[in-house]
Image (tube, rainbow, N blue to C red):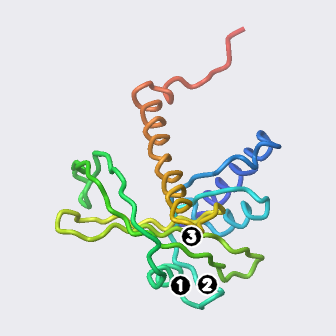
Amino acid sequence: MLTKKKVVKWSEASYFCRQRLEGIMSRVISVCDREADILSYIQDKQKHNERFVVRSKHSRVLVETESKLFEHLESQPELGEYTIDIAQKGTKNSKGKPVNRVARKAKLTIKVAQVTFKTKGETKPVNVVYAQEKRSKSVTEPLRWVLLTTEPIATLSQAFNIIDIYTARWRIEDFHKAWKTDAGAERQRMTEPKN
């Protein structure tokens, strides 16, 4: 559920990055998971000419076709294929029971498109990389990524680059998890010195 708190969180993060990074913000690519698929966030990034890769959660209506994003992507021609290593990971099943996801190689078909979301406010076209794992008997939950981006997508190499940028987020999340849980960063809250 989208709350005002979540919308504000993403807008504030962009604002503070903009203030701190000033002139070098044009070299920064914000990489976000589905939680950041908020139209106002994407419009804010576009308004300030800021780069991003956001994994899409919503199949919005498009200006070009009046169809929805996910259906539009299904109809696009395949640009090529990409193989990616999926690391082993402990996850939880639908009942909350811990299970291990085994490491595997995933073969993804790649499609791209440039689309414009139908909305009341000002909107600009956004590039999309659609990466979907081929179904097989050994894969129960195939990967399906719809990555919204400002980066170029005209060639297969450029589409691969978007996927590489997005998957780098995993290492950052693992770092934060280790920092918070193993290193106890949250237990080491900063306090005022005693005078």
Three-letter amino acid code at the position of disc 3: Val
Which residue lies under the disc numbered 3? Answer: 128
The foreground one among 119 and 29 is 29
- Percent coordinates x, y for residue 67 in the rendering: 55, 89
Residue 68 numbered tag: 1
Q: Residues within 10 Å of mark 1 (few under 14, many from 20)?
A: some
Three-letter amino acid code at the position of disc 2: Leu
Q: Is residue 90 above or below residue 148?
A: above
Question: Mark 1 touching mark 3, by CB under 8 A?
Answer: no
Q: Quadrant of the C terminus?
A: top right
Cα separation between marks 2 and 3: 12 Å
* The quadrant where residue 126 appears: bottom right
Residue 17: in sight, yes or no?
yes
Looking at the rendered structure, the secondary structure element under dot 1 is loop
- Percent coordinates x, y for residue 71 in the rendering: 47, 84
Which residue lies under the disc numbered 2? Answer: 62
Number of the front mark, 2 or 3: 3
Residue 24 numbered tag: none
Pointer 2 or 1: first along the chain: 2
Looking at the rendered structure, the secondary structure element under dot 3 is strand
Please report the residue visible at 60 percent of the width from the left and 90 percent of the height from the top: 65
Q: Of all residues shown, which one is farthest toward the bottom?
A: 66
